[in-house]
Image (spheres, rainbow, N blue to C red):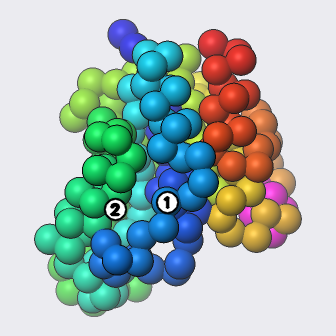
Amino acid sequence: MSRTVFLDRDGTLNRDVDFVRSPAQLEVLPGVADALQRLDAAGYRLVVVTNQSGIARGYFDEAMLARIHGELHQRLGGLPLAWLHCPHLPAAVGGYGGDCACRKPKPGLLHQARDLLGVAFAGGALIGDSARDLLPARGLGLRTVHVRSGKPFAAEQAQLRAEGFVPDHEAADLAAAVDWLLARS
Ligand SMILES: [Mg+2]
Ligand SMILES: [Zn+2]
């Protein structure tokens, strides 16, 4: 079975602008499209796992998120393979409120990937810019890379330390993270 790299979206693939509410707000970070092509060429399967509580907050709906991901998918050369998101927010009122199993730092989206797509964790990796993005990997045997291209790095690093979580590597951005991963695979 081929190895899988799980990718956070905001701050890892595209600039974190708090909430991307339409395709026009998408700004792909430098080197990302090329980095994904290199992973794909090396035989990795690529899956996005992203919290999108803007849906629970009423900022945009599922149809708009599908348009946003369609646009991003196109700009990234038809990668990644799959896009999994959590639309929930515990504090929200209505259908998307309350606790869920998929909002990161919970591992639900990774479990969905395993159960729905049949991808394995062994030999794989998770790349993200925040503590919340990386903590879902706990105990799953994934390599983890903390990238500096999103949320203020030191604060996220401190949060990871407080959780007793040490990423396997820290990198400037996705391209540097992929350099590191490919040198070890
Ligand atoms: Mg992020
Ligand atoms: Zn959820």
Q: Which residue in the structure is indicated by mark 1? A: 28
- Looking at the picture, how far across and down is residue 139, in whole percent? 60, 33
Magenta-drawn segment: 155-160
x, y (%) of residue 112?
30, 41
How far is the residue under mark 2 from the one under mark 1?
A: 21 Å
Disc 1 crowd, CA 10 A, few/some/many (<14, 14-19, 20+): some
Q: Which residue is mark 2?
A: 86
Nearer to me, 89 or 61: 61
The amino acid type, in three-letter code, at marker 2 is Cys
Looking at the rendered structure, the kind of residue marked 1 is Val
Residue at image x 34%, y 25%?
Answer: 119
Residue 46 visible (yes or no):
yes
User: Residue at coordinates 69% horizontally, 49% vertically from top-left?
Assistant: 173
**Magenta span main SS:** helix
Q: Up-down: is 103 above or below 166?
A: below
- Does residue 42 sit above or below 125 in this rendering? above
